[in-house]
Image (spheres, rainbow, N blue to C red):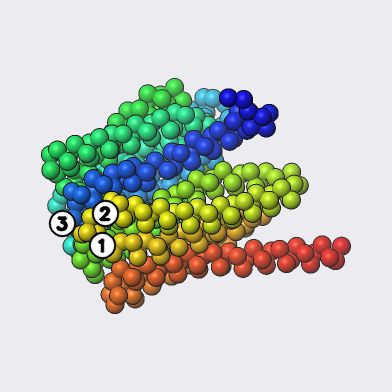
Amino acid sequence: MKYSPKIKKLLTNKFFVNSFWYTFATMLPPLTGIILLPVFTKYFTPGEYGIFTTVQSYVWILQLLMILSLHGAITRLYYDYKENSKEQKEYLGSVVMFTVVFAGLISALLLLLKPIVGPLLFKNIPIDPYYDILIYFALSSSLSLVPMAILRAQERAKSFVVINIIKSVIVMAVTSIAVIFMNKGPEAALFSFIIAGIGTGLGYIGVLYKSVRLSFKKQYIKQSLAFSIPLLPHVISGWAITASSRFILEKFVSLDELGRFSLAAQMAMVLGMLYTGVNNAFVPRYTRLMKDAKENEANKIMKYFQVGVIVLGVLAIIFSLLVIEWLLPPKYNGVSGILIFLLTAEIVRGFYFVVVARLFYIKNTKIVGISSVSAATVNVGVNLILIPIIGVWGAVVAAIAAELTRFLFNLYQERRYLNKKLQAESQE
């Protein structure tokens, strides 16, 4: 097949190729969940599915706290040692060693505090065996985040994707065997992630052993923590917006209701992850065009992104309703109504990405952080007020309110910046 010179240039462009692979890898976890959806909905009750996804939502935030978001520091500080290979390897080795020790200590402490922490986390979900599974799942996942960040910093996109594909295959294989043939419940499906984490951990060791020199130098650790710890409020805010509703729902509604909401949220997350993947490719390109004084071209791709948000959102609603019609058994009735509103919240989030691109370019990240904290506060507040009254629909209202809060807040700041810019230009 012959391609035009522009297409050939695009297909061989490292930025485009890496963006494609990273987007694909970002989509793997939700796609794995969608592929396994017929298994989960056939063999799990809504309550069991609610347990499965709620534990996953706890893992997401706990794994970041276990390593203090140090994977974010690597993607920035790795380049500070680009000119000295020895220092670079020692830097990576120090961060790896610290994360292993720190995550291990936190895990051991949480296991010791099980009688105290367990009842705080779970009300309707059985503490045994799910508390222990949560800790081991979070530990295995957290120890994968730093190697993933190293591969991204080294721009080894294909290795990054291959390892994530292997992880997804392990999860699907172990889950299918345990649930279908061994008649095991959600604990087996969750345990598959622990096995996959161990397997991919060995893969990372094989791929990265030449890039890391194990050490424990305090200056590297302090430097990384100084960068990563300020990111934690933003990370926690993100979790509060996307997953805290399940934490609150578990205390006030039945596990079956929790399961139906969780299924809708899981399906809506696919659209969110797709927007995130496209945004990861869009922001660097937009920033580069603006830096090169190609504002017209930058605004053009921003319009394409806006159209893409709408098109992808509409297609997601149509496709999701078809999936529900074809795949879900009667015990999951009621998911479609919840899903439409959660997808609407994700569409609002897509437009939030568009607005934030400009704020990132003018380096007004403080505003972005404030908007995330504000949205998280709105989400948790609305959840606490409405869930005891109207159940899962309180969580739906909270999701839409949170996304509208940060979108409108950032839109106001963007318009304010543009008005100031126009006034300055008119005075010149």
Q: Position of residue 210 (x, y in %)?
A: 44, 22
Q: Residue furthest right?
A: 428
Q: Amino acid at mark 3?
A: Pro
Is residue 108 at all visible to an observer of this figure?
A: no
For marks 1 and 3, give the one nearer the viewer: 1
Between disc 1 and disc 2, whose residue precedes?
2
Q: Marks 2 and 1: in contact by CB < 8 Å?
A: yes
Q: Amino acid at mark 1?
A: Asn
Q: Which residue is mark 1?
A: 333
Between disc 3 and disc 2, whose residue precedes?
3
Residue 380 shown left or right of residue 330 in the figure: right
Identify the element where label 3 is drawn. Answer: loop
Q: Which mark is residue 328?
A: 2
Based on the displayed image, in which of its 4 quarters is residue 191 positioned?
top left
Identify the element where label 1 is drawn. Answer: loop
Q: Position of residue 287 (x, y in %)?
A: 65, 47
Q: Give me the C-alpha separation between circle 1 and circle 2.
A: 8 Å
Q: Position of residue 302 (x, y in %)?
A: 64, 52
Q: Give me the C-alpha separation between circle 1 and circle 3.
A: 25 Å
For marks 3 and 2, give the one nearer the viewer: 2
Q: Residue furthest top?
A: 210
